Structure formats: C-alpha cells, structure tokens
C-alpha cells in the first residue's frame, strides 16, 4: 500500500472523533463510562497512527503519543465552544492513556512480528 494511503485510516479516525465531539449536547452516559469512550477512540487513533507511521522504536512511539495527546487536548479545548459540551481534563487524560495503549500495542506487536520473521 502506498505510504500516503496508509494515512487515510488515522485521518478518518481523527475526523470522526472531531465530528462526534462537535455535536451539541452529547448523550448522557452513566457514571464515568464516557471515559471508556474517550479511551477507546484515542486507542484506535493511536493504533492507526502507529500502523501508518510504521513506528518501531520507543522514541518514535513517544513522539507520536505526544502528538495524539495534543490532538486530544485540542479536541477538549474546542468542545468548550460547543453548546452543551465542556472542556474536561479527565477526558483528556483518558484520551492520552488510550493513545499510549494503542500506540504501544501496535509498536510491540510490530517489533515482535519482525523478530519472528
């Protein structure tokens, strides 16, 4: 697959996240289950970024984690301008933790796959 096309998945995931968080007044989720949604969305984004970038080193993964975490911060910031939404540092923490897990998982699996081959 050409390198440019590999980035289509993370771009679509990021666009989907920003579109979903741009809707006014999100559905009410019980307790802190919205944190699981944040974690899952950013884990998917982190995993797709790791796959697209073919990251193989801890340093490379760390740089992408910072980037995806900053996207989460930007998303939280933009939500304060959407009616019925608010900026929440705990949501950003869930976003960042999801990015760490998604990127780390794909990086470890990729390295393991290369060492077997």
Image (tube, rainbow, N blue to C red):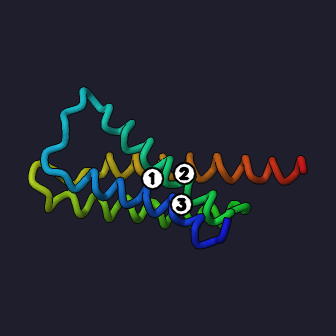
Element under disc 1: helix
Return the residue nearer the eye: 60 or 110.
110
Position of 66 compared to 83: left or right? right
Return the residue nearer the eye: 107 or 48.
48
In the rendered structure, are the residues bearing label 3 and label 2 in contact, judged by CB atoms less than 8 Å apart?
Answer: yes
Q: x%, y% of residue 5?
A: 58, 67
Disc 3 or 1, which lies upstream in sequence? 3
Q: x%, y% of residue 95?
A: 41, 50
Q: Quadrant of residue 76?
A: bottom left
Q: x%, y% of residue 31?
A: 26, 28
Determine the CA span between mark 2 and mark 1: 6 Å
The image shows residue 108, relative to residue 10, as above or below, that is above
Q: Which quadrant is the N terminus positioned in? A: bottom right
Residue drawn at (32%, 31%) of the image: 33
Q: Residue 65 carries which label?
A: 3
Q: Which mark is residue 100?
A: 2
Element under disc 2: helix
Q: How crowded is mark 3: few (under 14 residues within 10 Å), some or many (20 or more)?
A: many
The image shows residue 54, relative to residue 28, as above or below, that is below
Q: x%, y% of residue 42?
A: 45, 50
In the rendered structure, are the residues bearing label 3 and label 1 in contact, judged by CB atoms less than 8 Å apart?
Answer: yes
Check the image and name the residue furthest to the left.
83
Determine the CA span between mark 3 and mark 2: 6 Å
The residue indicated by pointer 1 is: 96
């Amino acid at each position: 697959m050409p390198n440019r096309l590999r980035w289509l998945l993370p771009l679509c995931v990021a666009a989907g996240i920003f579109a979903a968080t741009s809707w006014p007044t999100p559905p009410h989720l019980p307790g802190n289950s919205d944190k699981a949604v944040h974690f899952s969305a950013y884990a998917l984004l982190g995993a797709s970024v790791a796959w697209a970038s073919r990251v193989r080193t801890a340093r490379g993964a760390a740089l992408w984690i910072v980037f995806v975490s900053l996207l989460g911060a930007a998303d939280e910031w933009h939500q304060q301008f959407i009616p019925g939404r608010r900026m929440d540092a705990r949501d950003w923490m869930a976003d960042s933790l999801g990015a760490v897990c998604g990127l780390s998982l794909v990086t470890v699996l990729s390295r393991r796959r290369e060492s077997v081959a």
